[in-house]
Image: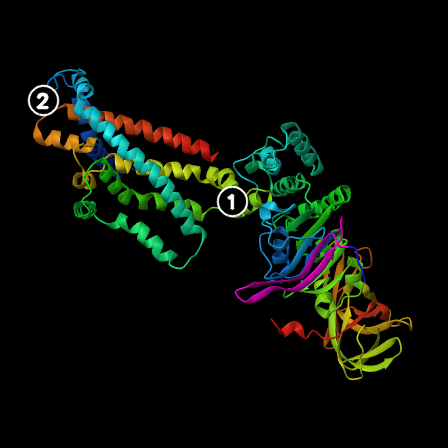
Amino acid sequence: MIEAPSYLRVESATKLFAGVAAVRDFTLDIADGEFVSLLGPSGCGKTTLLRMIGGFEFPDRGRILLEGKDIPLMPAHKRPVNMVFQRVTLFPHLNVFENIAFGLQLKRTSKDEIRRRVGDALDLVRLPGFAERAVATLSGGQAQRVALARAIVNRPKVLLFDEPLSALDLQIRRELQVELKDIHRELRSTFVYVTHDQEEAMTMSDRIVVMRNGVILQVGDPIEVYRAPASLFVASFVGNPNVWAGTVAAVQNGSVAVSVGDRTFPAPTPGVPLRVGDPVALVLRAEALSLSTRMTAAPELCAAEGTVADVRFAGTVVSYRVQLGDRQLTVSRPPQAEILHEGAPVTVTWSPRDSILLPPDEDERTP
Amino acid sequence: MTHRRPHVSGLAVYTVLLFLFLFAPIAFVVLFSFNKTAGLTFPFHGFSLRWYRAVFSSPTYRESIVASLRVALITVVVVVVVGTLAGIGLTRHAFRGSGAARGLLLFPAALPGLFVGIALLSFFVQTKVTLSLWTVTAGHLVYVLPYFVLVVTSRLQRFDYLLEEAARDLGAGPWTTFRRVTLPLIAPSLIAGALVVFSLSWDEVFITFFTIGAQNTLPLVIYSTVKQSVDPSVNAISTLLLAGSLVFIFSVRRLVVDLQQ
């Protein structure tokens, strides 16, 4: 099979630190203009992978190809890629203009063009008129915008982001997420974005690469990763779902019956073959569950009765903890719905197709 | 609160005495540098600049000032280069024996000047090196390098190496990164270190005494002048040194503050 060479390709890359693999036999293709997020907990190898693309680390095995050219050993200063770092890395002895012009000056770009391109970059990151400002006078959000401008102005083939918003306040982070997505749409260049924040990855990316222990657990667009997580780890990392341990009670074509305690619920069949008696995890997302004060439910829905144990009003959602015998479920409802109080008897219902059945996480115990 | 009054005035007396102890000798030297007559004690006979004229017309003083300047400036230049490289090496990489290297580099500062002087003298004699201002300079290098390394490593330990990665990311090679990012940011501490080195070398006596050849440095000339005779020109040269170092310190401080902003 002949494939068109991808824009950026990481091929079987392995990076060891003191004999331990930070990134293991990693292969990923990224298309021109794509916004790809590397998502995972700290220590999953996402930053190491990004630094290998940036030329700050070099793979012990494997290749990195940019537009078909092998560049694994090319040092950072010769690579046509630029990075926005997690911490503020603006040069404190230079002003905003000089910081952004740094890369262009090294390439001996003419003064007029530097002035024009720095101006354009400042407009793009919504900081017009900031050229003469001293770096020390910038807020955290402004500093990261300048860092973005400093990278963009060089028109890199790939723009790398190492958790650039993680040190910022929630509100500014949200604002910048929206802007970053807009900027990506405007530039149509390739973004590789490292984050441990699933919401950030979800809202901005074309594709999400979920990583753990240096390997890929799942690659897919945000909706795919959310609706069809490949493993319990991915399901738990994306969103914060309820997970019930159960066993397979019956397998029919197209449906599985799962027994959890003394209850049995229908669930959609997972991708892997199951036999009666297999341990499984039933994943119920808080936002896929409904709460009702009536004790009857439509026959096509799963239902479980319990009492409200805790109510948390968070503004955008109301989060209920419902006690069902010795088990609990977290259910979220819109704040417009009637507010139920602690101790209220309720029925939790969900459609079987909204539940997710996954093998229990055996990797959990391996380092 | 009347009962506190004697206490406060006792403190005031103590403070005045302390400042007298600190500054009276200095005031005395400055005053007598302008004395009309050759007396080194009161009474003061009136102002004149004769001792300053004596200093400026004396070839011994002129030559020794030039010699001291030469030694101090060469010491500064060599120490800034060697010490900066050493500081970078010590702070950036944890190599095998880097702890020992650091300890050995700083060790000479703990040695008595007298010991360093005797050691260098016997070394030069054994290796048959003719004593001159060059041997003095070599001695000063041994003595001042640790101080400079201390100043520069304390700055480099606080240096954010991510700034260098950012520079590399933007296309700067190792040398360009050093010249355009690292050097401008550590320059204030290099200047501060150079200032320390200059002043240490400028009035160094012990090591100089043992390693000096035919040409004398200024501190040795002053020393021998005072020993030989009662010469009030020593007051004049001392006052000039005082004025020089005050101007020097304040202008360098201004420069360091400006660079940091």
Q: Position of residue B66 (x, y in %)?
A: 25, 27
In which quadrant of the rendered image does the N terminus of chain B lie? top left
Q: Residue at x 37, y 37 (%)?
A: B192
Tell which subunit mark 1 falls on: B
Check the image and name the residue furthest to the bottom.
A277
Disc 1 versus disc 2: distance between alpha carbons?
A: 63 Å
Check the image and name the residue furthest to the left.
B229
A162 shown above or below B223: below
Q: Quadrant of residue B124?
A: top left
Give the residues drawn in magenta, as a range: A5-34
Q: Residue at x 69, y 41 (%)?
A: A155
Query: Does residue A332 appear in the picture of this structure?
Result: no
- Dot 2: element: loop
Q: Residue at x 59, y 42 (%)?
A: B171
Check disc 1: other Cα within 10 Å, few if <14, some if 14-19, many if 20+: few
A333 shown above or below B145: below
Residue where numbered disc 2 is placed = B39
Left or right: A361, with B151 as reference point:
right
Residue where numbered disc 1 is placed = B174
Is A312 in front, or is B229? B229
Are labels 1 and 2 assigned to the same chain? yes
Q: Residue at x 55, y 47 (%)?
A: B165
Residue type for callout 1: Pro
Residue type for callout 2: Gly
Query: Does residue A254 appear in the picture of this structure?
Result: yes
- Dot 1: element: helix
Q: Is residue A150 magenta?
A: no
Check the image and name the residue furthest to the right.
A299
Check disc 2: other Cα within 10 Å, few if <14, some if 14-19, many if 20+: some
Asked whether the residues under the numbered discs 1 and 2 touch, taking CB atoms below 8 Å apart as contact, a structural biologist would say no
Left or right: B241, with A119 as reference point:
left
